[in-house]
Image (spheres, grey):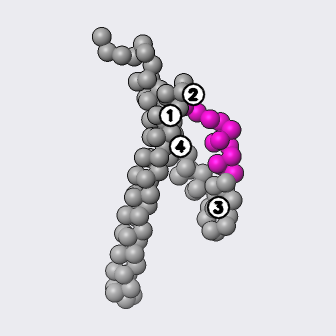
Amino acid sequence: MDTTDLTALRSRIDAIDARLIELLAERFRATDAVGRLKAGAGLAAVDAAREAQQARRYRALAAQHALSSTLVDQVFRLVIDEVVRNHRALADAARPDSAPT
């Protein structure tokens, strides 16, 4: 085993992980803006039709890139669940009856 190759591959993985985290942060900034718009308009935190549409899109993208659709589903389920929690918190904070007394 060539440790130079292993080190280079691990460095590449570390760089990819950093990009994934940057992209997640960017995604959550965008979904936070969506949540604020929804809260201001009194819209529900969950949009089941949008989630179903996105799930189909994620599966197609997984197939296109030879990734396990189960893995992609699991990753995005975690992300979407966190987005929904954030949207619900924003909606709760926007309700007039939630103001501190």
Mark 4 or 3 closer to N-term? 3
Which three-letter amino acid code belongs to the residue tagged 3?
A: Leu
Dominant secondary structure of the magenta stretch? helix
Mark 3 or 2 closer to N-term? 2
The foreground one among 35 and 7 is: 35
Task: Name the front one of labels 1 and 4.
Answer: 1
Q: Position of residue 81 (x, y in %)?
A: 51, 39
Say whether marks 2 and 1 touch (CB < 8 Å).
Answer: yes
Quickly name the residue at label 3.
61
Name the mark on residue 80: 4
Q: CA distance from mark 4 to mark 3?
A: 17 Å
Which three-letter amino acid code belongs to the residue tagged 2?
A: Leu
Q: CA distance from mark 2 to mark 4?
A: 17 Å
Q: Position of residue 92 (x, y in %)?
A: 44, 23
Q: Does the rendering let one see residue 82?
A: no
Which three-letter amino acid code belongs to the residue tagged 4?
A: Ile
